[in-house]
Image: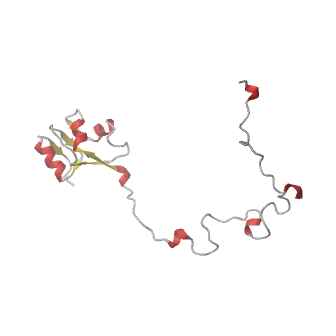
Amino acid sequence: MQLNTIKPAAGAKHAKRRVGRGIGSGLGKTAGRGHKGQKSRSGGFHKVGFEGGQMPLQRRLPKRGFKSPIARFSAQVTLADLNRMQEDEIDMLTLKAHGLVPDLTRTVKVIASGQIARAVKLQGILATKGARSAIEAAGGAIADVAAA
């Protein structure tokens, strides 16, 4: 193979449609736009979803669902995650350093999923009732923040 012999596969390339170039092209005169009307004129297009003045579908359907604006700033950590960590004192910075919560996180809550078999001390982290009792049963403690 030589660089000067490389060609695209047959049928892979085709000529661009040239409209308004005379009767012989098949796209002369109205250039494939039909006769009259908004879409035949230059600049004559309307917004996506416009239905000729009829109430558009996206406005006919009811609004549904809710996306909390604070959800992206809060995260959850399981008891199993805490059990895998080596540190005995765990705070927000420690969790971020281990990649357990995203950098944007402002509040973290420990949920009772998995087991914890060692004593850990949580600083500035929320915990559910079940997680709190499991941590305290393992000899750990939760400081600063009340159970939520």
Residue at 30 percent of width and 38 percent of height: 93
Image location (x, y in percent) of residue 143: 18, 45
Question: Is 122 situated left or right of 7 in this image?
Answer: left
Residue at 80 percent of width and 69 percent of height: 35
Residue at 60 percent of width and 75 percent of height: 54
Q: Nearer the viewer, residue 134 or 16?
A: 16
Quick one: which residue is furthest to the top in this view? 2
Quarter of the picture containing the C terminus is bottom left
Q: Quadrant of residue 2?
A: top right
Image location (x, y in percent) of residue 18: 81, 52
Q: Nearer the viewer, residue 23 or 62?
A: 23
Image location (x, y in percent) of residue 87: 22, 33
Question: Is 59 situated left or right of 6 in this image?
Answer: left
Q: Nearer the viewer, residue 90 or 51?
A: 51
The vertical placement of 41 against 99, above or below, is below
The vertical placement of 42 against 94, above or below, is below
Quick one: which residue is furthest to the bottom in this view? 54
Question: Is 14 situated left or right of 92 in this image?
Answer: right
Quarter of the picture containing the N terminus is top right
Image location (x, y in percent) of residue 21: 86, 55
